[in-house]
Amino acid sequence: MSSLFLILFIISHSLCVFVNSAGEVNDSLTLLWPLPAEFTFGNKTLSVDPALSLVVGGNGGGSGILKLGFDRYREIVFKNNHGVLALNTLGGSRQSYDISKLRIVVESADEDLQLGVDESYTLFVVKNDGKSIVGEATIEANTVYGALRALETFSQLCTFDYGSKSVQVNKAPWYIKDSPRFAYRGLLIDTSRHYLPIEVIKQVIQSMSYAKLNVLHWHVIDRESFPLEVPSYPKLWNGAYTKWERYTVEDAIEIVNFAKTRGINVMAEVDVPGHAESWGTGYPDLWPSPSCREPLDVSKDLSLDVISGILTDMRKIFPFELFHLGGDEVNTTCWNTTQHVKQWLEERNMTTKDAYQYFVIKAQEIAISKNWTPVNWEETFNTFPSKLNPKTIVHNWLGSGVCPKAVAKGFRCIFSNQGVWYLDHLDVPWDVTYNADPLEGITDISQQKLVIGGEVCMWGETADTSDVQQTIWPRAAAAAERLWSRREVTSHGNSYATALSRLQYFRCLLNRRGVQAAPVTNFFARSPPTWSGSCYDQ
Amino acid sequence: MSSLFLILFIISHSLCVFVNSAGEVNDSLTLLWPLPAEFTFGNKTLSVDPALSLVVGGNGGGSGILKLGFDRYREIVFKNNHGVLALNTLGGSRQSYDISKLRIVVESADEDLQLGVDESYTLFVVKNDGKSIVGEATIEANTVYGALRALETFSQLCTFDYGSKSVQVNKAPWYIKDSPRFAYRGLLIDTSRHYLPIEVIKQVIQSMSYAKLNVLHWHVIDRESFPLEVPSYPKLWNGAYTKWERYTVEDAIEIVNFAKTRGINVMAEVDVPGHAESWGTGYPDLWPSPSCREPLDVSKDLSLDVISGILTDMRKIFPFELFHLGGDEVNTTCWNTTQHVKQWLEERNMTTKDAYQYFVIKAQEIAISKNWTPVNWEETFNTFPSKLNPKTIVHNWLGSGVCPKAVAKGFRCIFSNQGVWYLDHLDVPWDVTYNADPLEGITDISQQKLVIGGEVCMWGETADTSDVQQTIWPRAAAAAERLWSRREVTSHGNSYATALSRLQYFRCLLNRRGVQAAPVTNFFARSPPTWSGSCYDQ
């Protein structure tokens, strides 16, 4: 039977409750999140050696990222072994395991991480057939980033069996052939409304890798605070909340590098000309006036000079080809009510709308001159679509229907409809997040290809270190499967039957890995559990 | 001036707001939590070498725990250096730092960690006086556990300066002489109402060490689930919620060892005869009847046999001399309404109250035979004080006034008055937690000495992985200072003036270390921040 048929067959058989009242678990489910593109499995249980060794091949086999990834996943998979069994097996009486080696073949040594990087992989977990001395699992990928996705899938196949106290792969043999549906699978964090320490951003990035998300959209600065160091304009981070709520250039580089080793790109955002009041703490001339502080003063060269300085400095930090220039929610009242700006507009016969367009286009030119592809929030497209640089990627947020319009005009688009994918909307339940599709309303295949993916947005007004992770998870995971897995699967049938149990399992997997993912079925996101109970039921 | 006078002087000068409206920080505060017993400081700023090296001395200087602790704190202190500066200094052009070595002298090589272990230390941070080649900070302690407390204090003195991009100690020279007010400074976690993964328990333990708490009271089993493996009675963990929500013996040992390297004891609890319904999932004979399942069947030998088996197995895991036997909330209705139990009582001319006492005393005898000191919830003392073994430590929870009665009868006592120190009471603000004192109502000094300390309790009905840390923190820190620091200091003046700013700073320190501590001043604990703002203001 075809893989797709098999998947639909599996899903149609997962209607039954995951944990029954006696606490028994329904083992017939495929406990993978997000579901791979194609997979088949059997009915054997294989044991996995706690001293699992890595065997590499291919031009990219020697990758340091690969080795780090293997070590990271070995620690996750054998967490309950506490290093004890691995040590025990070093003695003479070596126990026999079905899987003692993980062979990873990476075709290419190119570790450039850009939009559309090949994340495909195949994964085989088969019992030793007697021909070789030890059993193996095998991963094949074109890039190290595909291999990282495969390692995540492999780690989800491995479960600790509390009876035998060993790690097992159930329902082997597994044949998995996988690749993402969308190239761009993002999560926004907002470090202006609340500063998030480096350690916390790393926790977020690490957890993203579990759901195969691959872009951290770092909304680093906004109206409320300016935490980032900009060497060209060193007073900008005077706009930080305090002298401690800051990121050095080195901090930002550390985050980018940390993300890269997880196959995750960091897309920074400089939101102009609105959302920029904090810039003026260090450079008050950027305000139209001390009493009217936004948008940036369009009449002064300083405004574009500072943007140019920021982007020059940021280019050294952020190698990702996409850069976000914001452009949303620009209230131009200050331009009309501040005398010198008003005069500047009049001299040029410009309306404030013209000036908004002028500013956005200038910022795009700066970004493009630095070899960046500009991303802008949808208001720019909604207001002056024909003026935007054709390279522009339109970032939807206000509602549905924008990506269809943008791709019809030849722009690329990112889907983040706030009604379904804004994580700060706490009244959006998991299934509403899950059932939103970036291609909704787009039937033309060539236009569909212009939708590069989607992004869930964790705006920070009420999300700080204490609650950011349980506001992100588990709903970000619902979007992650939508973005990774085949539409025929994620849109087939009732998601309460096809996805809920697996999502509950994935939420508990996040918990086991130390991530503060919240209960899945509470109506309000990030709510505490209503009462005692199993993680797998809540 | 005397140290105490100095401390009071400092506190009286910390009335001013911590962060003013311009985001400037009040640097006159002593940003240590909990406050040391005695300290003086100056007005110099010293730089700390990112390649800070450890020099050890004393019989205990070679301790592995010490080395691990130093490495852990070095990582915390130099988090923003990203290993870069340390590497740079390996070259020829070595920058000069005021503090390049941390000398730690540990008198004793004895690493036994028991109640009352010597946690005292002295810490000197002084600028190189020109006599020695490199500057040093010095720690002296009688045990490695005192040295760990000193390392925590040292790490709090070190702050990253974003201007010079280096770690600094402000207000040097520092002379600190410190020791805890109480020997027992506990936090209860409840893994029965919600299973907490190993990784999460480790996060809790690690965060406890930041506040100098030293006992993890592990309420491992209860009515709702029985997650722990008991080799003598292997069906007991059939009472786990699911086959995955379990702890192996090895898991438990791992937790004990992890805690020990942080100077934290683990006190396990087996709560009998109530709160034990989950035991009967594997051994239904422990229930009075299938329809009346608690307390444990007092009429059967099996009940005490199983307790004995559990305690025998647990003794191999938990070396701490204290063991908690519960004894709270025993509703004996099932004993009176189940025919065979009722008959057993009648044959012995026992009331249900007699049987409750009989059961608790028998359990105490088993624990004592295993060289454990029994701890019991206060109902046992409230009901039959004269029958309790004199070694019993009475654990207060119902309200105030119990410790005074218990110590008047010669028992030792732990303070956990639910109105102030139950963390699941979300309507208790930080200052109510802070201002509760374990010695309230006890004036006799010899009786005061019987109060070994206190414990904040994180009951798990609505606390799982997603919210346990922000329910614990920051209020557990309020209790931690109460338990560590001198009463003359913590009870002096208005805590909004003496403690709030420091607690807000400590909460942000926890955040920087990746701990999900909640805003301090929200009326309901663990509430998200109400809106954008600085961590230091919320």
Image: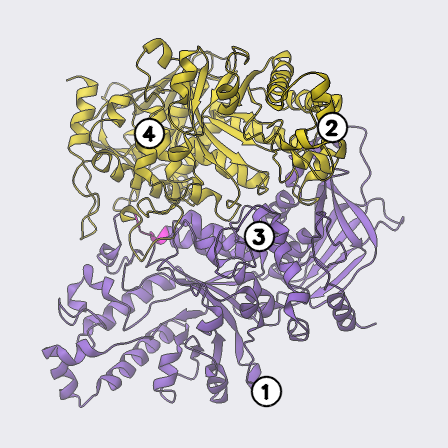
Chain colours: A purple, B yellow
Give the amino acid type for the residue marked by disc 4 in the picture: Ala
Q: Which residue is mark 4?
A: B436
Check disc 4 and report its element: helix, strand or loop.
Answer: loop
Name the residue tied to disc 3: A65
Q: Which of the labelled discs sits on residue B231, or is there none?
A: 2
Picture layout, residue A480 above or below residue A152: below
Identify the residue under disc 1.
A443
Residue B278 found in image quarter: top right
Residue B8 versus residue B536 in the image, above or below: above
Residue stretch rendered in magenta on the structure: A244-250
User: In terms of sequence position, does the residue under pointer 4 or pointer 2 come before the other?
Assistant: 2
Mark toward the viewer: 2 or 1? 2
Provide the secondary structure element on which disc 3 rests.
Answer: helix
> Which secondary structure is most common in the magenta stretch?
loop
Answer few, some or many: residues within 10 Å of disc 1's Cα (few below 14, many 20 plus, some between 14 and 19).
Answer: few
Mark nearer the viewer, 4 or 2: 4
**Left or right placement of residue A43 versus residue A295 in this view:** right
In terms of depth relative to the viewer, which is nearer, B31 or B348?
B348
The spot of residue A430 in percent (x, y) is 55, 64
Q: Chain of mark 4?
A: B
